[in-house]
Image (cartoon, grey):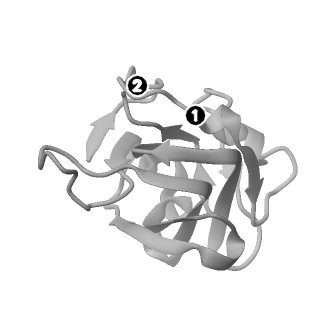
Amino acid sequence: MESAGRSIPKLPWPDIGHLGSWAVSSYKFGFGPECLQDGDPDTFWHSDGSQPHYITITFPYRVDIQKLSIHLSFPLDDSYTPATLCVRAGTGMNDLQDIRIITLDKPDGWITFDVTTEPNEDGDGFKPVPAYLLQIIVFANHMNGKDTHIRGLRVLAPTE
């Protein structure tokens, strides 16, 4: 996993998140899914309700997803900071499969990681995931917090 500061990192992978339709399991007024893509490190999606919390991105056609880049801040968000994330992908809600589980220890800044750990054919990286639907699930927060804060999310395609 690669880590960066508060500003959106300059990454070689194209961000394809704008191609999809974003939905979240819940949110507090003024802290909805639009805060995940606004590029402002001072805004965040604030879930509201019981866990797990999830972000679902539906694409109008199949896309290849290589990495996710997520902005979290334990120093600012404390028990609202995700500790365990699960990434799921599929063609629709009925065939989602878990493709990666990430455990984080007091993250601060942008964290970029591959969506899968399956090696590519060349053995020098990981395979992208073809999907119509991507879901990121917050299974647990630091210090057993209930609601969650995520300050930014980027869906990244392969460079080719």
- Which one is nearer the viewer's eye here, 129 or 70? 129
Quarter of image, res 20: top right
- Which one is nearer the viewer's eye here, 122 or 126? 122
- Seen from this angle, which residue lies furthest left? 123
Residue at x-position 43% and y-position 54%: 129
- Residue 150 lies, in percent from the top left, at 58, 50
Is 84 on the left-hand or right-hand side of 90? left
- Seen from this angle, which residue lies furthest front? 121
Residue assigned mark 1:
16
- Residue 136 lies, in percent from the top left, at 56, 61
Residue assigned mark 2:
9
Element on which disc 1 rests: loop
In the rendered image, the vertical position of residue 85 relative to residue 157, given as above or below: below
Is 119 on the left-hand or right-hand side of 6? left
Residue at x-position 61% and y-position 62%: 148
Mark 1 or mark 2, which is nearer the start of the sequence?
A: 2
User: How far apart, in angstroms, are the residues tagged by discs 2 and 1?
Assistant: 15 Å
- Which one is nearer the viewer's eye here, 21 or 59? 59
